[in-house]
Structure formats: C-alpha cells, structure tokens
Image (cartoon, rainbow, N blue to C red):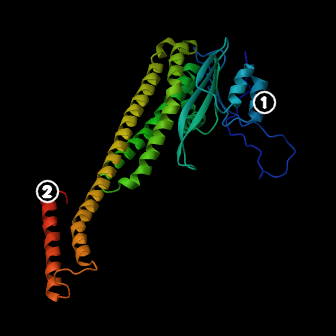
C-alpha cells in the first residue's frame, strides 16, 4: 500500500526567480489535509488524507513517484496535456481523469481544465493542470475548518470524491446561465437594427457552446463508469449520492443541446433580417432606377444633335420639364400604391 507522509496544513512556498539566490532544490507544491478521527469507535485504522497538487510539475511528479507506487502509465497521463476523460481500475486504487470548463480571462473564452485523481482506501489525490475554483475553494475550507474536515473526510474517500466532482459540476451552471443571458440579449438586439454588429456576438456565443460541449460530451461515459466503480470506496448508505452527479451532467448536456438549437435559430433569424434589409435596399434602388429610366430617355431624345420640336424655345423647355416631372410623380404614386416603395 502506498505510504503517505505526515500532513502539512500550510501552503508550501515554491522557489521562484524573485526568491533570491539559493542552492536548495525547489520543494514540491504539495498540500495535505487529513481528518483526525481521534477516539471515535467507528474510526478507520488509517486516517483519510486529501492531497492536492495544483499544476504538477516535474518536482511534484517526482514527489508522487517517491511516495506512491502508481503505474508508470498513470504518471505519463498526469504529465500529458491531452488526456481524455477515463477511469483506470487497479487492485489498490482508481485513477480518474475528468475535464471541467474554466473561464480564462486572459483570452476571454472557455478553456478545458483537466483534473487527475488517485483514489485509494485512505487517500485521495487531486492534480488539476490549471486552477479549478470549486476544487480550490473546497480544499481551502477543508484546511481552515476542523468541522469541514470531519464532514468531508469522515465518510471515506468515496464521499470526498463525490463532493469534489459534484462541486465542479455545480460550478458549470453559473457559466451556463451567463450563456443563456447572452442568448436572450442577442435575441432582443436582432430586431433593433444591430444585425450586422451581432454577427460577431453570435459567433462568440456559438464558439462558447461548442467548447462547452467538447468538454462535457466525452466524459458522459466516464461518469457511467464512475457510477459502476464507486462501490469500492463508498458506503452503502451513500450510494445514492453519485446519482446526483449523473443527473447534474445530464442537465448540463440538456441545457447545451437547447442552447445549441437556440443559437442556430438566432443565427438563421439574424441572417434573415440582414437579407430582408438588403432586399429592401435593392428594391428602393431598383425602383429609383426604373423611375429615372423614362426621364433619361426623354432627356436623351431632346438632347440629340438633330432638329427637335420646340428647339430654341424657352416655352418648350418648360413644357418638357413639366412633362418629365409629371411622369416622375406619376410613377412614384403608382409604385407607392403597389407597395414597392
């Protein structure tokens, strides 16, 4: 069974470029909390420990290899940046890879955060490749409060695994609500004369939905595998908890399916509005061209270098000009009556 060192209830400082000259090797960024069962009659023989290693680097992976006898392929998966969601079962532990959406403010879009987890009878190790707010928040609460440590760690690694995964999925719903608000705003703006400006907004929302679906879709089967393997570290009376995770995942997927249909409908509506506006412009321009055509014909006839009736007469000029004006207003009235203008 893997051996685990004593817990450290404070963040280990990492050696950086501003730390001053030092010949000491950088320490691993390993944080540990454990529940002290004390004299509880039903306390396990070995206390449960939650080990969190955020954005593990080579030093952190070396620390894991020193203290845990995990399969080499698992360590390769931890170092990999393109690992798909999965669950690997071993006689002494489970290796779980899950993906969650995290909003990256630096680029203004959703990115994928990978959470690698090792689950054993007396330990749970979380290895997020980038900060995941719900995991950070839960770990800090567990570290700061003895009551929270007892609540999370006294029910075994299965319950702790449930809380981590459940909070991470719950974190998706505020992001989905924001996407829904964006879609509602786009729907209102389509008919306010901003159709051309909304093309980029619709494209951005559509890209967010696509990215969200790419994160959630592959791990739906992984959650079904988790439902099957949870009995190894979950008490019988807590079995129903993982049904809540599956339900949350399905609700997220249903919302994404709905948003996908909505954004496609909004895109079609926006294109229709733009098309109608272009048609209106073309109709006006065509009508003007048709009205000007007979006037151009009359002006061309009386502008030829041949003798024409009324040539050299001021009265004839005004008669021709009046006839052209009458023709123009007559055609304008006819077009308005037909609804072409």
Q: Position of residue 340 (x, y in %)?
A: 19, 57
User: At 56% from the left edge and 19% from the top edge, which residue is drawn?
Assistant: 158
Left or right: 184 as drawn, with respect to 250: left
Q: Which mark is residue 338?
A: 2
Return the residue found at the far front. Answer: 306
User: At 15% from the left edge and 70% from the top edge, which residue is drawn?
Assistant: 327
Q: Nearer the viewer, residue 256 or 274?
A: 274
Check whether the beta carbons of the residues at disc 1 and disc 2 lie within 8 A of each other: no
Q: Position of residue 51 (x, y in %)?
A: 66, 29
Q: Which element type, helix, strand or loop, lies under badge 2?
A: helix
Question: Residue 170, relative to residue 190: is it above or below?
Answer: above
The label nearer to you, 1 versus 2, is: 2
Of the 4 image quadrants, the one containing the N terminus is top right
Question: Residue 112, relative to residue 74: is it above or below?
Answer: below
Question: Residue 263 occupies which quadrant of the picture?
Answer: top left
Residue 80 makes an appearance in the image: yes
Left or right: 121 as drawn, with respect to 327: right
Q: Position of residue 221 (x, y in %)?
A: 51, 20
Q: Position of residue 209 (x, y in %)?
A: 45, 38
Q: Which element type, helix, strand or loop, lies under badge 1?
A: helix
User: At 77% from the left edge and 45% from the top edge, which residue is drawn?
Assistant: 15
Of the 4 image quadrants, the one containing the C terminus is bottom left
Distance from Cα at disc 1 to Cα at disc 2: 82 Å
Q: Nearer the viewer, residue 311 or 45?
A: 311
Which residue carries the number 1 mark?
A: 62
User: At 45% from the left edge and 46% from the top edge, which residue is drawn?
Assistant: 203
> Mark 1 packing: few (<14 Cα in 10 Å), some, or many (20+)?
some
Question: Residue 229 occupies which quadrant of the picture?
Answer: top right
């Amino acid at each position: 069974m893997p051996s685990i060192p004593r817990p450290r209830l404070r963040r280990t400082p990492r050696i950086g470029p501003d730390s001053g000259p030092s010949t000491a090797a950088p320490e691993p960024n390993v944080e540990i909390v454990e529940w002290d069962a004390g004299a509880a009659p039903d306390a396990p023989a070995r206390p449960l420990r939650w080990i969190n290693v955020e954005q593990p680097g080579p030093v952190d992976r070396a620390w894991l290899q020193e203290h845990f006898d995990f399969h080499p392929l698992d360590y390769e998966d931890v170092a990999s940046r393109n690992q798909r969601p999965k669950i690997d079962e071993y006689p002494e532990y489970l290796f779980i890879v899950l993906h969650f959406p995290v909003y990256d403010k630096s680029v203004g879009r959703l990115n994928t955060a990978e959470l690698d987890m090792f689950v054993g009878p007396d330990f749970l190790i979380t290895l997020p490749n980038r900060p995941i707010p719900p995991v950070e928040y839960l770990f800090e609460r567990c570290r700061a409060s003895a009551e929270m440590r007892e609540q999370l760690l006294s029910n075994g690694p299965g319950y702790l695994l449930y809380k981590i995964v459940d909070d991470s999925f719950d974190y998706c719903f505020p992001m989905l609500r924001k996407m829904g608000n964006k879609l509602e705003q786009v729907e209102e703006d389509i008919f306010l004369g901003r159709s051309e400006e909304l093309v980029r907004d619709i494209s951005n929302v559509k890209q967010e939905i696509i990215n969200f679906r790419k994160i959630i879709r592959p791990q739906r089967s992984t959650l079904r595998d988790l439902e099957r393997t949870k009995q190894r570290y979950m008490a019988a009376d807590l079995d129903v908890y993982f049904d809540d995770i599956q339900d949350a995942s399905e609700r997220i997927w249903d919302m994404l399916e709905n948003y996908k249909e909505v954004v496609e409908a909004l895109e079609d509506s926006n294109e229709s509005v733009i098309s109608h506006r272009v048609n209106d412009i073309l109709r006006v321009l065509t009508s003007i061209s048709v009205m000007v055509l007979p006037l151009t014909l009359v002006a061309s006839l009386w502008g030829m270098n041949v003798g024409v009736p009324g040539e050299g007469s001021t009265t004839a000029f005004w008669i021709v000009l009046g006839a052209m004006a009458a023709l123009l207003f007559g055609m304008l009235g006819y077009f308005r009556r037909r609804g072409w203008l």
